[in-house]
Image (cartoon, rainbow, N blue to C red):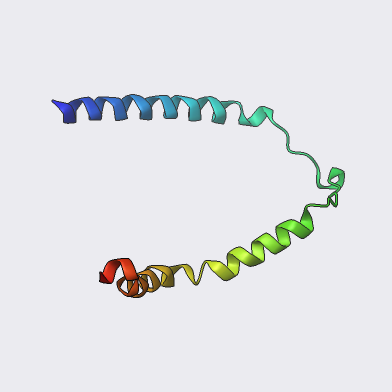
Amino acid sequence: MARRRVLVVMLVIMAFLLRLYGNFSRNAENIRPSAARDFRPRVNGASETWRWLTMVCCCAVPGADRVPVGITLWVPSCPIMTA
């Protein structure tokens, strides 16, 4: 009975999303994209912060898979664990 209820809820959610997609796609031809000649990029002060944040993330993500191994090696050597 619970599986049937989950299935019905998922079907209702999918029907809602399909209806929403239909509304968006029907009205898509009324929206005109802006021309490339109107585009003027602005320089803001946050670019330096984003550059450093991106660099930190790019350096930290490859090392993230080593964290569980380091914890596994460190925990047995804790004084609380050896007592």
Please state, as top left, top right, bottom left or bottom right, where the C terminus lies in the image.
bottom left
Q: Is residue 56 above or below residue 8?
A: below
Residue appearing at x 31%, y 30% in the figure: 10
Q: Nearer the viewer, residue 26 or 54?
A: 54
| Residue 73 pos. (x, y %) | 34, 75
Q: Residue furthest left?
A: 1
Q: Is residue 64 above or below residue 13?
A: below
Residue appearing at x 61%, y 26% in the figure: 27
Q: Quadrant of residue 47?
A: bottom right
Q: Is residue 25 above or below residue 55?
A: above
Q: Is residue 78 above or below residue 32?
A: below
- On screen, residue 83 versus residue 14, left or right, reads left
| Residue 67 pos. (x, y %) | 42, 69
Residue appearing at x 74%, y 57% in the figure: 49
Could you tell me how many numbered marks the image carries?
0
| Residue 7 pos. (x, y %) | 24, 30
Residue appearing at x 25%, y 25% in the figure: 8
Q: Nearer the viewer, residue 32 or 72?
A: 72
Please state, as top left, top right, bottom left or bottom right, where the N terminus lies in the image.
top left
| Residue 55 pos. (x, y %) | 65, 67
